[in-house]
Image: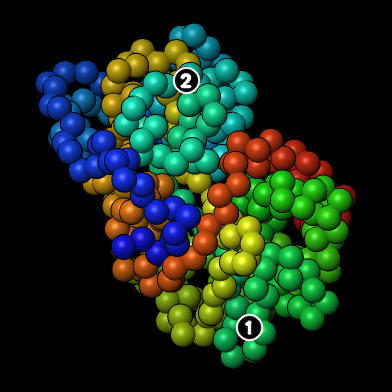
Amino acid sequence: MSAISKPLTLTVGAVLFASAALPVTAEGELNLYSSRHYDTDERLYSDFEDMTGITINRIEGNADELIARMGAEGANSPADILLTVDTSRLERAKDAGLLQSVESEVLEARIPDYLQDADNQWFGFSQRARILFYDREDVTNPPQTYQELANDEYEGMVCIRSGTNVYSQTILAALIEHLGEDEAQDWAAAVRENFARDPQGGDTDQLRGIVSGECDIAMSNTYYFGRAIRTDVEGVSDSLEQIGWVFPNQNDIGAHMNLSGGGVAANAPNLENAVRFLEYLASDQAQEYFSAGNDEYPAVPGVALSPSVAQLGFFKPDDVDLSAVAKNVPAAQRIFNEVGWE
């Protein structure tokens, strides 16, 4: 059972692909440009190759570098698929003309509308909720909304990532969509006043800050905490009982979701195989592995969660149009610069 609450419940008749196996071919290849850096994704790729006979050739690197490379390669690019983290990067690839529209009944039926591009140029395949964590020993009244993180009572308590980080940019971009730029800027300035330290490190470092006592409240994606439940993460796993969590804004907009997704390259030389790969990522088998292998939430409603993810509990996600959020990222970066959010 999914730990995401009713708004994402699978509707009747939406399972065209589900766990059905892909037809086997004995030929073909797929050129995958991926910025996902998780060893557990190896299983996704090997299963697809075993099921289809299609060989995956991978180019891995930083998302911005891959997008720049595709642009430089132009019409001669060998890329079939761009797979990356965060909607803003997918939207940037689309705006640069690096992706193409895809017609797929499977993807339309499996992926909720708000997790796919309006022109079908990119699709989300896994999600992470960006939520609030806190020290159970020191914080008796943790913030229940993103807006409350700006309250004066939390002065000197908050640890969070840099304003140049894409996760920080997208949460502010989502608040711009919900609240407008002026209110979002007031929020960013007030949260800046509540910092326990200047922004530093990744999401795991924010959680470590709670354990060390440097932070009382931190913002992090759920999969970092889920990983600490499932495996041994230094500085976090031995102190899980110290850390509490809040899915923010459960009475209104819901918890912000970061997306991992992909699209078919504009000049894909293996177009049919590229579409087949995206459809595979929407299958029950692949969706379950996103959760079991990397502690993420599936994009397809109703897919079972791994115990490490399910342990976090049920919640209401924000179903804001992620394309609109991506378009707000430049404004978010400007606001961070103006309020001195380093």
Quadrant that contains the C terminus: bottom right
Residue 101: give its label: 2
256 versus 269 height, above or below = below
Mark 1 and mark 2: span between their CA atoms?
49 Å
Q: Residue at x 44, y 59 (%)?
A: 6
Give left or right: position of 177 versus 45.
right
Amino acid type of the residue tagged 2 in the rendering:
Ser
User: Residue 295: image x %, image y %?
Assistant: 38, 59
Measured as percent of width and height from the top left, residue 200 is found at 67, 62
- Report crowding for label 2: few under 14, some 14 to 19, many 20 or more residues within 10 A (C-alpha): some
Is residue 70 at all visible to an observer of this figure? no
Is residue 171 among what the camera can see? yes
- Across and down, in percent, residue 55 comes to 23, 26
- Label ID, residue 213: 1
The 10 Å Cα crowd at callout 1, few under 14, some 14 to 19, many 20 or more, is: few
User: Relative to the observer, which residue lies in front, 26 or 102?
Assistant: 102
Q: Which residue occupies the foreground of this view, 269 or 212? A: 269
